Image: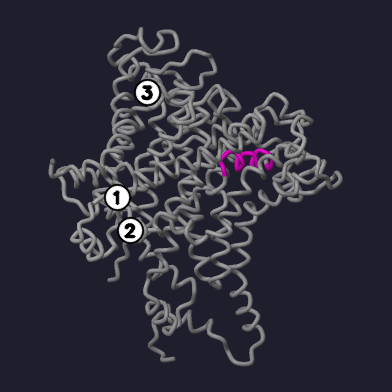
């Protein structure tokens, strides 16, 4: 009997899953991006096409627009997520613990709800008068009622993604705040510092690592995410108005408006994200010592 | 207070309560209330969404947050008289969809729990070549956005003959949850003392028996936390069944809500919200009871 037979028994299922659904797809994505595979060629009559797909991507007339959209989407959503997550974490740790826990629980609701139901709620909130909740809330302030998904699609994209995304930072920051020794706060209060000064001078500097971690981690997930956009504006309302890179890859290869699914070209678009994802994950792993931060946010007491 | 206080001390001192001054008492009350007011304002949008969802499912007509029709249970009649609901006429019936969703999330959970505990145990206890490399790649995949692999996964499923089948989607979903699962379970196994296992091994029990009989019961909190996460994540899943099960014979509830939403822009929201609430309710109830575990695991802070 092989001395590693026990290890083989325990590891085989996990190895097979990782091989089939991570390693193979990465290799296939890269390989497929060098072919002309599409609905027209089928999965067997395709041909190698070298770097054609990548050249097409660089020259494409919508590439710059979509790249711009993607950066706009990632930067604004990220800012919302981090600022909101930090704000809710600071405030909810400042108030009475039970109330704070309740607020955090409510913020977690969008994350634990099915994306389709969450998108349904926002679609309705953004509906045209007399239905939409947003209209009811802003009309007293003199804003004219409208169908927000058509008139201000980006606003809805930011809101729907932001109210989900902020809870990630909120949870990381909250556990980081909780792990700050209570004596630091007590000493500051004895010295006469007020709540704002404590947040500014003690809590925020100690949250440096968690903030950096959330920024990096969420940048990557935002670049790859498109589920909520797909469910609300679906890249519209105009041509590619709110289309982001990952949604573009999805539309090209898996759900084309034009009926012809271009697997090869879609794979090339996805390959950009895959390579980026691998690089960022590697950075997270090496520099931020990913797991240290996740399981026990790193806090430096100087 | 001494006169040599630094400027930041001086400003703090001025906000200290002066005795018998009513205006500073008001200021203090305001300062206590302010965080609550800000929290409520920012949290309000989320609350309104869920309140509206619930309200709308019980009224014939809503305008924003205000019911303009009468109270009704009509929107819920898909539960007892599904054939009379016009919006659902060309859709798969809701009870089989619910069962599919349940099967999907339970099967995903089972696969994730089994494979994660096997690999987690090996990585925690056994020494074998490639152990460190595998641990590293698990961590790498943990932060890798697996959604970018969907196009290629389509090819893999075609090759395996699992395209357009619930089983295929279950495997993909389970695989995407594995990196986190393996890492969580390894953490829990790390905390189990060696002595218990040693005793069992010395008594002549095999590794596999020891793992299953002795160690697994000791990591029940880990199994529970990971199981909850996998179940919720499976129950909510939309993209994978949407992309990999186009024919819909084994569709899940998310696909139904999505197709109603797709055509429902200007029609009856009563039924749509009732179906939506029906779909999210099990998760909300679960959240009510397992809030602490879920909060911890979503923060990534599950420790062994």
Q: Residue visible at 53% across and 25% down?
A: A240
Marks 2,1: beta carbons within 8 A: yes
How many C-alpha atoms fall within 10 Å of the one at disc 2: few (<14), some, or many (≥20)?
many
Q: CA distance from mark 3 to mark 1?
A: 26 Å
Please, what is the dominant secondary structure of the magenta stretch? helix
Query: First in sequence: mark 2 or mark 3?
Result: 3
- Alpha-carbon span between mark 2 and mark 3: 33 Å
Task: Report which residue position mark 1 lands on.
Answer: B120
The residue range painted magenta reads A114-125
Q: Quadrant of the N terminus of chain A?
A: top left
Q: Which of these two is toward me, A10 or B270?
A: A10
Using the image as rendered, state which of residue A250 and residue B34 is in the foreground: A250
Q: Does label 1 lie on the same chain as label 2?
A: yes
The C terminus of chain A: image quadrant: bottom left
- Real-space Cα distance between discs 2 and 1? 9 Å
Q: Position of residue B54 (x, y in %)?
A: 71, 49
Relative image position of residue B47 (x, y in whole percent): 65, 54
Question: Which numbered disc covers residue A125?
Answer: none
Are the residues at dot 2 and dot 3 in contact (C-beta closer than 8 Å)?
A: no
Q: Seen in the image, is B269 located left or right of residue B247? A: right
* Earlier-in-chain disc, 3 versus 1: 1
| Residue where numbered disc 2 is placed | B188
Q: Chain of mark 1?
A: B
Magenta span has A118? yes
Residue at the right extreme of this rendering: B70
Relative side of B269 to B99, left or right: right
Q: Secondary structure at mark 1?
A: helix
Q: Which residue is mark 3?
A: B160
Does residue B40 lie above or below B233 as drawn? below
């Amino acid at each position: 009997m092989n001395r590693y037979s026990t290890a083989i028994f325990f590891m085989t299922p996990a190895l097979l899953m990782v091989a089939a659904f991570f390693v193979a797809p990465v290799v296939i994505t890269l390989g497929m991006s060098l072919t002309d595979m599409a609905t027209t060629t089928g999965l067997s009559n395709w041909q190698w096409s070298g770097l054609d797909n990548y050249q097409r991507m660089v020259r494409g007339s919508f590439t710059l627009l979509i790249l711009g959209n993607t950066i706009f989407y990632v930067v604004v959503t990220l800012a919302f997520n981090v600022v909101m997550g930090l704000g809710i974490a600071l405030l909810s740790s400042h108030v009475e613990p039970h109330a704070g826990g309740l607020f955090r629980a409510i913020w977690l609701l969008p994350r634990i709800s099915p994306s389709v139901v969450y998108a349904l709620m926002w679609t309705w909130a953004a509906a045209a008068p007399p239905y939409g909740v947003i209209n009811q809330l802003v009309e007293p302030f003199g804003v004219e009622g409208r169908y927000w998904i058509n008139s201000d699609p980006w606003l809805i994209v930011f809101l729907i993604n932001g109210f989900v995304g902020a809870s990630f930072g909120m949870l990381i920051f909250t556990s980081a705040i909780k792990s700050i020794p209570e004596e630091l706060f007590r000493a500051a209060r004895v010295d006469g510092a007020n709540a704002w000064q404590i947040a500014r001078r003690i809590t925020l500097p100690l949250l440096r690592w968690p903030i950096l971690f959330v920024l990096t981690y969420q940048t990557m997930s935002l670049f790859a995410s498109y589920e909520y956009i797909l469910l609300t504006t679906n890249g519209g309302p105009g041509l590619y108005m709110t289309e982001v890179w990952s949604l573009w890859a999805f539309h090209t290869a898996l759900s084309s408006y034009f009926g012809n699914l271009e697997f090869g070209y879609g794979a090339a678009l996805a390959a950009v994200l895959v390579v980026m994802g691998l690089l960022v994950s590697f950075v997270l792993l090496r520099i931020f010592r990913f797991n240290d931060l996740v399981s026990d946010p790193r806090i430096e007491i100087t | 207070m001494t006169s040599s206080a630094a400027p930041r001390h001086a400003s703090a001192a001025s906000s200290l309560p002066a005795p018998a001054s009513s205006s500073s008492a008001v200021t203090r009350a305001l300062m206590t209330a302010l965080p609550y007011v800000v929290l409520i304002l920012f949290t309000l949008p989320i609350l309104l969404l869920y309140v509206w969802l619930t309200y709308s499912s019980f009224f014939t007509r809503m305008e924003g947050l205000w019911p303009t029709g009468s109270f009704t249970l009509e929107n819920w009649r898909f539960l007892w008289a599904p054939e009379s609901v016009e919006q659902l006429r060309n859709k798969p019936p809701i009870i089989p969809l619910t069962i599919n969703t349940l099967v999907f999330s339970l099967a995903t959970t089972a696969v994730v729990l089994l494979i994660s505990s096997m690999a987690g145990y090996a990585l925690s206890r056994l020494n074998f070549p490639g152990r460190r490399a595998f641990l590293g790649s698990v961590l790498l995949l943990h932060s890798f956005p697996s959604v970018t692999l969907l196009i290629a996964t389509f090819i893999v499923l075609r090759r395996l003959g699992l395209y357009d089948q619930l089983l295929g989607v279950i495997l993909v979903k389970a695989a995407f949850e594995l990196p986190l699962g393996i890492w969580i379970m390894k953490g829990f196994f790390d905390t189990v003392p060696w002595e218990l296992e040693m005793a069992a091994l010395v008594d002549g029990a095999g590794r596999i028996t020891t793992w299953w009989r002795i160690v697994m019961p000791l990591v029940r909190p880990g199994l529970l936390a990971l199981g909850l996460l996998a179940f919720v994540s499976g129950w909510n899943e939309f993209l994978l069944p949407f992309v990999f099960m186009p024919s819909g014979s084994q569709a899940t509830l998310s696909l139904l809500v999505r197709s109603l939403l797709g055509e429902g822009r200007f029609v009856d929201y009563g039924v749509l919200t009732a179906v939506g609430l029906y779909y999210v309710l099990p998760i909300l109830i679960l959240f009510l009871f397992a809030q602490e575990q879920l909060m911890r695991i979503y923060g990534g802070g599950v420790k062994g």
